[in-house]
Image: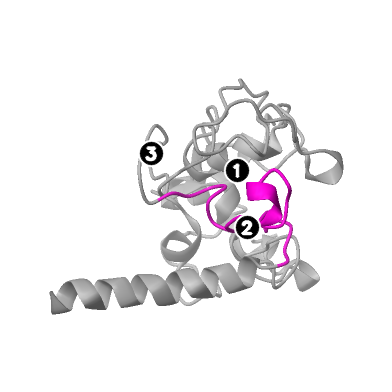
Amino acid sequence: MKKLIAILIVFFVASTAIAQSITSSAHDFSGETWNNGGNGEICITCHTPHNADGTVTGSPLWNHEVTSATFTLYNSSTFDATIGQPNGASKLCLSCHDGTVAVDNFGGSTGGTVNISAANLLGTDLSNDHPVSFTYNATLATTDGGLYDPTTASSGLGGTITDDMLFAGEMQCASCHNAHDNTLGSFLKKSNATSALCLTCHNK
């Protein structure tokens, strides 16, 4: 029982801290009329403690409709990784940002009418966006020659690039962006002043 109480306290403290960092950001939908008349919860549009959608590997108690779009992928003669359709955290991000799924499609609802637009809309053509959902490891770093070894290079966030920025060894949208914290703007995981975020992985 004591262990359970301790876990619940940790969960409460963590969720409170996350909610505070989202409050008043572009990811705070609690005041939208489509979210319980403007009196909704902050977390519920993406997460639920019960009956979560587990179709995407690593999805954190997911509560939002998942995109089924087929994306045009990044392609370049200098890109040495093998890339496939977005998966994991990137597929979850694109479940709003591709524009094919309404923001208000959550909690089992699929009849939403509010879609992302303007600068927040990535669409389904990702050919001119940073590639995601590819394995970034020491082998790729050696082959490419312009990347740091993620298993040894510091992320600047306390550990290595692999520890702090990759998901099951893959580069994802959430490698650079933290959907729960907009302190630095653009939901960046670390500052990109003087290209610091880019230069975490790229050595030139």
Magenta residues span: 24-48
State the mark number for residue 177: 2
Dominant secondary structure of the residues highlighted in magenta in the image: loop
Label 3 sits on a secondary structure element that is loop
Q: Position of residue 87 (x, y in %)?
A: 49, 35
User: Which amino acid is tagged 2?
Assistant: His
Q: Is residue 4 above or below residue 121?
A: below
The residue nearer to you, when weighing 111 against 99, is: 111
**Left or right, residue 1 beside residue 65:** left
Which circle, 2 or 1, is nearer the viewer? 1
The residue wearing badge 1 is: 93
Contact flag, marks 2 and 1 (Cβ < 8 Å)? yes
The residue wearing badge 3 is: 57
The figure's colour scheme reads one colour
Work out whether mark 2 precedes mark 3 in sequence or the reverse, and give the earlier one: 3
Contact flag, marks 3 and 1 (Cβ < 8 Å)? no
Density class for disc 1 (Cα within 10 Å; few <14, some 14-19, many ≥20) is some
User: Which amino acid is tagged 3?
Assistant: Thr
Residue plotted at (59% across, 62% down)? 180
